[in-house]
Image (cartoon, rainbow, N blue to C red):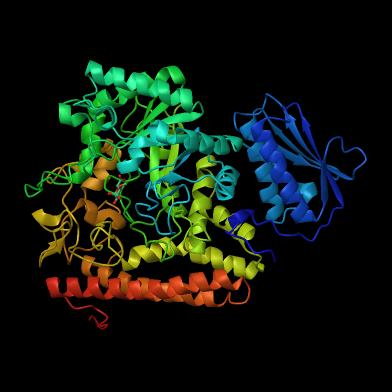
Amino acid sequence: MESAKWSQLWLDYKKCKDSVEKIAIEVLGFDRAHRVIDSGVKELKLALGRIFGAEVSEGNGAADPFAVKIVKDSAVAKEGYELVSSASEIRITASDENGALYGIFAAIRKLSCGVAKEEISEKAAPSNPLRMMNHWDNMDGSIERGYSGNSFFFVDNEIVVDERTVDYARFMASIGINGIVINNVNVKDAASYLITDRYFAKVKELSEVFADYGIRLYLSLNFASPIELGGLELCDPLDESVINWWKDKVKEVYDKLPLLGGFLVKADSEGRPGPFTYGRTQADGANMLGDVIKPYGGIIIWRCFVYNCTQDWRDYKTDRARAGYDYFKNLDGQYHDNVILQIKNGPMDFQIREPISPLLGGLTKTNQMLEVQIAQEYTGHQIDLCYLVPMFKEVLDFKTYCQKDNDTIADVVSGRAFGNSLAGMAAVINTGNDFNWTGNYLAAANLYGFGRLSYNTELSSEEIAREWIKMTFSLEIVDEDMLTDMLLRSREIYEKYTSPLGIGWMVTPNGHYGPSVDGYEYSRWGTYHRADHLGIGVDRTDKGTGYAQQYYKENAEVYNDPKKCPDNLVLFFHHLPYTWKLQSGKTVIQHIYDTHFEGYAEAKEIAANWEKLEGKIPSDMYNNVHHRFEMQLANAREWCDQVNSYFYRKSGIEDELHREIY
Ligand code: GCV
């Protein structure tokens, strides 16, 4: 086996049983020299050579036994493709180059998953126009919330473009990603200079590598650039000198970076500058930038993660969960058409269980996209196994009641619900420069899964898991089944041993790994979970913070009533006595005890399952995951002990099963 410098993830093409001596690739109707078609042909040559052991050539393949044809047909949907095959050919039809590339990767995926070359058939079109990855990479090479090593884009304040960058672009294109933000939304230090001569040449090079794979490069922007770069005294979005500064700057940027997709902006949040400083609204800030970038076809992606982390919540009316809706809903309809609001899946911050943000679908006249996090900040740091696709499916399937039909989150963020052409999904990515890209080999399932789901929101969590397993490993069916089951159960297991019933947090402040029941970092006004000797939970009903009323009536009624509210969110919405009977029939306290014991026991089960794969997968992979399972078990044990003993001491209520609580 050749020694590699980094893993090839799911594109590590393996030989199949079927050998073919010669395969011809033909490009019909597309410009063969187009950069994306060229990448597709290269990928096909590599894959077909490896999978069939074939000699792959280009041109008219009449004399050859088998051909792969890439055919242009304007009838196929934008960025979509159609695959058909017969004894003599695989035909990949698309109307544009990205569609052709996705069709090529889809054909390769089928072959890698064991479909016979004569039986390939699929028709697909992307669910979402924007399918993006957000890197939180800093220019010094560190990654905010990164658990897989350092950045592969930035080292010591310089930009790196090398073979690894090309591989990264291949991986992203293979799962349908068409936009990548390369730098952290907290734009600090050298990153502010990404839009200056100091970095233009390298950013351009990177944008070209991405463009070869149909991907647009985006940059996170420092809203205070007029001050930091321009020497102005303010960055008020309605000030003429500020607007003129931006006009000149954006012109310069597009002269130097013609392939740039646009900017992502975090404003007025966690110390970042923004329009609030000048008494302006979020729309004032976003629209000013939108107008300035419009002549160049660029877009502004404006984040809705805007909240005041120093707010005093002792009045029990002030509630961080309300912030996104409160700041943005009343501006619905005021955002310009090249501005899109990026909204986190929940109202707080990527907890293992949160309700869906009421802003998604709450806005009806504004471009909006969903932001999820595959970097496992609150879900186990890529140490603990936590396959997140089931969570994303729940989000997408959520019925908002924003209108009669077409009202799920998937409908809203795809643009279907309200007819937006600017719409989509973004993930805070989980990669770094580790050999295997994602720290834990199994965390690559989230990387793969997010891309596949953003391209096709109809895929099930299981289908995605199975595809990823087949493409990554070479296992017997029974082992594939076992690994699929491990992935599918992992989110629920993690939820069981961490914070219960939707309350969230209880995690070590700042680092966000391991238990600290009272440890919410902004807790100077009291504990986040409001537990005392009688009960626990945050009252977000009409009698509490009123957050539940931010949903459409049908959902508001359910969340407002502790008897109707789903158990798994009941402490997010209600302050309840420990003796409160859940819909499951258990009391709150017994649920806490049971799930924590179960979570730990089930973590042990999946860790033991992994041991059954020893010898069946490469040893570096096996050992990497095995070591992480050891750490996961220690973590699960600690969570179980700390949470159970904390609530036993607080409530004084015995476990019905009299298990040992330390
Ligand atoms: C990039 C959370 C994280 C921060 C992150 C922020 C955000 O608060 O802990 O690291 O900052 O979300 O999404 O902007």
Query: Is 244 on the left or on the right of 521, as rendered?
Result: right
User: Would you say residue 122 is visible in this rendering?
Assistant: yes
In the image as oriented, which residue stretches furthest toward the front?
198
Q: Nearer the viewer, residue 604 or 336?
A: 336
Residue at image position (36%, 44%) is 184
Residue 284 image position (x, y, % from top left): 25, 23
User: Would you say residue 127 is visible in this rendering?
Assistant: no
Residue 474 image position (x, y, % from top left): 66, 65
The image quadrant that residue 658 belongs to is: bottom left
Q: Is residue 522 above or below residue 86?
A: below
In the image as oriented, which residue stretches furthest toward the right?
63
**How many discs appear?**
0
The image quadrant that residue 246 belongs to is: top left
Residue at image position (15%, 51%) is 539
Which image quarter holds the C terminus? bottom left
Q: Nearer the viewer, residue 611 or 24?
A: 24
Query: Is 200 on the left or on the right of 511, as rendered?
Result: right
Residue 305 image position (x, y, % from top left): 28, 40
Q: Is residue 418 above or below residue 295?
A: below
Residue 459 image position (x, y, % from top left): 55, 47
Residue at image position (39%, 73%) is 631
Which image quarter holds the N terminus? bottom right
Query: Is 56 on the left or on the right of 618, as rendered?
Result: right
